[in-house]
Image (cartoon, grey):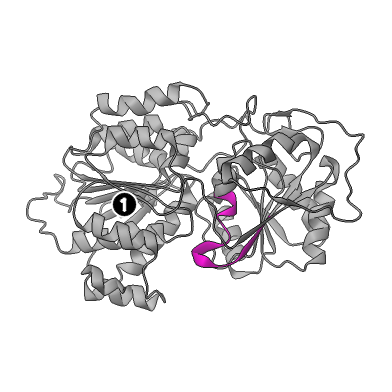
Amino acid sequence: MSFAAFGLSEEIVRAVTERGYTTPTPIQQQAIPAVLAGGDLLAGAQTGTGKTAGFTLPILQRLSYRSEGSAKGPSEGRPPIRALILVPTRELAAQVEESVRDYGKYLKLNSMVMIGGVNINPQITRLKSRVDILIATPGRLLDHIQQKTVDITKVEILVLDEADRMLDMGFIRDIKKILALLPKKRQNLLFSATFSDEIKLLADNLLDKPAMIEVARRNATADKITHVVHPVDRERKKDLLAHLIKQHKWTQVLVFTRTKHGANKLSEFLEANKITSLAIHGNKSQSARTRALAEFKTGTLQVLVATDIAARGIDIVELPHVVNFELPNVAEDYVHRIGRTGRAGAEGDAVSLVCVDEKKLLGDIERLIKRDINSIVIPGFEVDPRIKAEPIINGRSGGGGGGHRGGAGQGRPGARSGGGASGSGKPSGKPAARRPAGPAGNSGPAAGRGAAALHRSGGRGR
């Protein structure tokens, strides 16, 4: 099947072909016709399956060939924003906007990325000219709404991308505020890397008779990813990581820590051991995050150490290695982490360094992905049986997991930060239980009330 078979314009097909894509992925085969049909859509696909093109291509098609006569602009006379794509993090916003620009390069449509962590004034200036498609993080969009520098009352198509992560980050209040300002008659598209029960609740209150697409079973991992666990004492994790990188001559490695502080400390350790490394997390300036990601993508940076939130939006072709320096407190985050490798059918390695504190977390992950992960002890790094397990508190594993005592109390990435401004540490009183994020970014039953309240807030699309 070709992209032209969907009825996409010659301009869009040409742009897609120039990117080197000729055959649609399974999610694209199902999502593109569904979006072109004009109805609401709930789509779930494991990361790296081409989800972004699954909604950007048909949106470009619909906007470029729909009459604008009925859509009057703001009082200043500017054309209205016609499509709004909400994403959880700055990096993902930049990635999606790049796809919109690349696929729409031969169309007379203009796009803009709106994120926090950068000066708002250039964004205000950009909004004075035509913007057809706006890709935004919720917090910064609300900044503009409050300053009356943006008008979203004429939006025809709304996309919630990585909706599961937006709920995890506590964006439900911001999303409700945004939905209340949108026109009730619009097309709603909800995309998510996983189909959790919380996502289904959100969909029930947002979508109107949606088409449903799920191209992989819930919380599935890519088939070509090799999973391995290396048992190691918590105090020796950094040494083992440096050993693996040097021993196997790894040249491009994405490493996950639970906390921002842990990411900084690990990056400094690797640099001291002559392994080029940078950390990426919400406390870094946007320019520093962009620079680190660019160097990592080009291969000039050997190791990128990231928190879960900051890593959303990292899309690197054939990234060979992902390392869990610390296992995530929430099992589903393992799927998101290792989804950075093995993308679009490529092979990849998912390596986890597991200390005695993390045995329960490992069991949770194995139950979730329905497989036992092969455990290999590296000679010279055998586990000391005398070391007892310590509780993982506030993202900090015992005495040497790489965090610090306040490291994970990072809560909700304040609405003003534009998303992605938080690290990934989470309280872990019950690490096995995945509870939806509440309005303030804490887990608890409030999240369910928040999602259900979408209906009461007028958030329903039609």
Neighbourhood count class around disc 1 (C-alpha, 10 Å): few under 14, some 14–19, many 20 upward = many
Residue at left offset 92%, top offset 54%:
380
Residue that appears at 61% across and 45% down: 307
Position of residue 223 measured from the top left corner of the image (x, y, whole percent): 56, 60
Examine the structure image and report whether residue 296 is included in the region drawn in magenta: no
Q: Quadrant of residue 99?
A: bottom left
Of 94 and 375, the residue lying toward us:
375
How many numbered discs, if any?
A: 1
Q: Is residue 223 above or below residue 363?
A: below
| Residue 348 falls in image quadrant | bottom right
Give left or right: position of 397 versus 57. Answer: right
Visible residue check, residue 110: no
Where, quadrant-wise, is the N terminus in this rendering?
Answer: bottom left
Question: Which residue lies under the disc numbered 1?
Answer: 134
Across and down, in percent, residue 265 comes to 75, 45
Numbered disc 1: secondary structure: strand
Q: Is residue 341 magenta?
A: yes
The C terminus appears in which quarter of the rendering?
top left
> Over which residues does the magenta segment extend?
336-350
Residue drawn at point x = 29 percent, y = 67 percent: 104
Q: In the displayed structure, does residue 369 sit left or right of residue 419?
A: right
- Percent of width and height locating residue 244: 79, 60
Callout 1, which amino acid?
A: Leu
